Structures are given as C-alpha cells and as structure tokens.
Image (cartoon, helix red, strand yellow):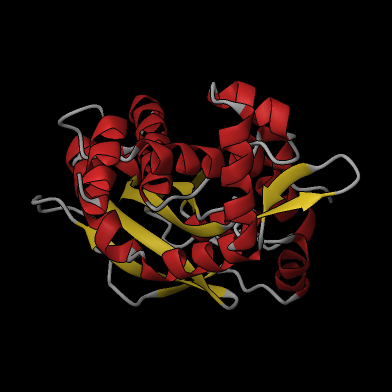
Amino acid sequence: MTEGKEAGARDAGEEGGGSYTIQALDTAISLLMLIADQPDLGLSDLSRRLNAGKARVYRQLKTLEERGLVVCAEPNRTYRLGPSALMLGAKASRQIDLVAIARPFLARLGEQVHETTQLRVPDGDETVCVASWEPARELRVQAFIGRRRPLYAGSSKVILAHLPEPERSKILARKRTRITDNTIIDLDQLKAALERITRQGFGVSHGEINADLVSVTAPIFKLGGIIAGAINIAAPAGRMKSEQLEVAIRLVKSAAADLTSAIGGSIPGSSAGSQW
C-alpha cells in the first residue's frame, strides 16, 4: 500500500467509515472550545471532560500552543486561550454581517406581534437604526434607516445600560434634553432605569421619544458579552396594553437571545449588572 493510501485508510478509520469528520481534528476543536468555556483547567481535567487519553490531549495542546491558540500558565500548568485565538475572534467578528443576519429575526418577530421591529446599534453618544421591518397595516410605526436617537432616551437606554462603565459614565455626564414629557433627564432616575434594564434583561419606553408610542427592547451581545445593539418592538400606545406588553417582552427577549447566538455572541451573567 502506498503512503497516500495508508494515510487515506487511517483517515477513513478515524472518520468511522462514510463520515467526512476527521476525529483528531474534531477532538482538537472540542478541546479548544472547552478551554474557551472553562479556562484554567489542567491536562487531567481536560482529558477527563473530553473522555480522551492524556497522551492525545497533550499532543493537541502542544500543537495549539505552538500556533498561539492556547497558552500554558505556570506553576499549575493550566490552559487558557492565546493571542491567536483573540485575533481569530476579532477577524470572525468583522466578517459577521449583523444587519444581514438580523433581518429574518426582525421579520419573524414583527410577524408574531404584527408591529414594527428594528435593530439599533451604538454610534458615539447616539444609536442608529440599521435595519427594520414594518407590518402591512394602516396604522403602524415607521422606522427610518439611519435615524439617530440619543443613548439616554427610549429604546436606546438598553444599549446605554450595557456599555462599559467608563463609556457609560461619560454619556451620563453630558447634558440631556427633554424630547417629550416622558423623557428621563434626571440623573438618579436615569441610573435607576438603567439598573432595572440590566436586572430584567429588557427595557420598556412609554412615550420617551414619541408620546403616542411604546417600545419594548432587548440587548444583543457580541462575543465576550460586549453590547452589539438592540432589537425592539415599537407600537402605538393604544395597542400595547398590559397583556400585549407581556407577550412583547417575552418575544423580544427570545429574539434578542437567538440573534446573539446567531452572531456568536454571549449574554453576560446575571451578576454583570451595573454598579453605581
């Protein structure tokens, strides 16, 4: 048997016959994902959780270490992600088109509630509508692509609540202008609203941008729990009574969680709320 045929036979054996999965590569990827999820485990723990032999896992760790995907920390010889993994994640993040991925989520959410949905992303001290869906009904909220809103008002507060503390503090230190009678401009009240958003995982705006409208918003996160934007439902106040509001909250939170997963993001733990 030639060398090429021997290699092919070995691959076929590892692949389990007709499968195209390369077992060694699959195990290495599982190892890398395990280290990403549970850093600072040693060889024994990693082998046990993967149900793989120490010798095989050690060889894969050395290969990943040589490529900079993991690093071994002394003196306990535990492993965590390396600089190459960070670079890979950054490149993957840039290649993911949030708007394109979000569109079907906006459409499905909008069809469920028969109301306008939109995706807003942060830009400086404002947010921008970058995608939307509108129902085919005469009375509906119009969502204009490119329309900007201040971070402290309406659905944008959900993004403000999840910004890194230094950035959030800078925004809160700036002057706020009342847009409607319901716009929150008092600092203590605004901080309380932001804390409530981080605790509940969603925000509700009763006429803060337009006195006749109600919006229900949930955050979308990138890898590492970094805020990427927010998805919201906007409706005339008369159509968003308590029962409809409860349904909207449940659906928008679910849609935001699904979209976060679709872009490879992660939702921060419940303990990640703001400390003022």
Q: Residue at x 33, y 51 (%)?
A: 234
Residue 226 in the figure: left or right of residue 28: right
Task: Tell me: residue 193, above or below residue 100.
Answer: above
Task: Tell me: residue 255, above or below residue 92.
Answer: above
Q: Residue at x 46, y 43 (%)?
A: 29
Res. 257 in view: no
Pinpoint residue 202: horizontal percent, then vertical percent: 52, 41
Front position in the image: 9 or 140 = 9
Residue 229 in the figure: left or right of residue 79: left
Question: Split into 4 quadrants, where in the image is the N terminus?
Answer: top left
Pinpoint residue 43: horizontal percent, then vertical percent: 71, 33
Q: Residue at x 35, y 33 (%)?
A: 251
The residue sitting at the right extreme is: 75
Task: Tell me: residue 186, above or below residue 10.
Answer: below
Looking at the rendering, which quadrant does residue 190 occupy? bottom right
Pinpoint residue 78: horizontal percent, then vertical percent: 78, 41
Looking at the rendering, which quadrant does residue 226 occupy? bottom right
Res. 237 in view: yes
Front position in the image: 149 or 92 = 92
Residue 138 in the figure: left or right of residue 258: left
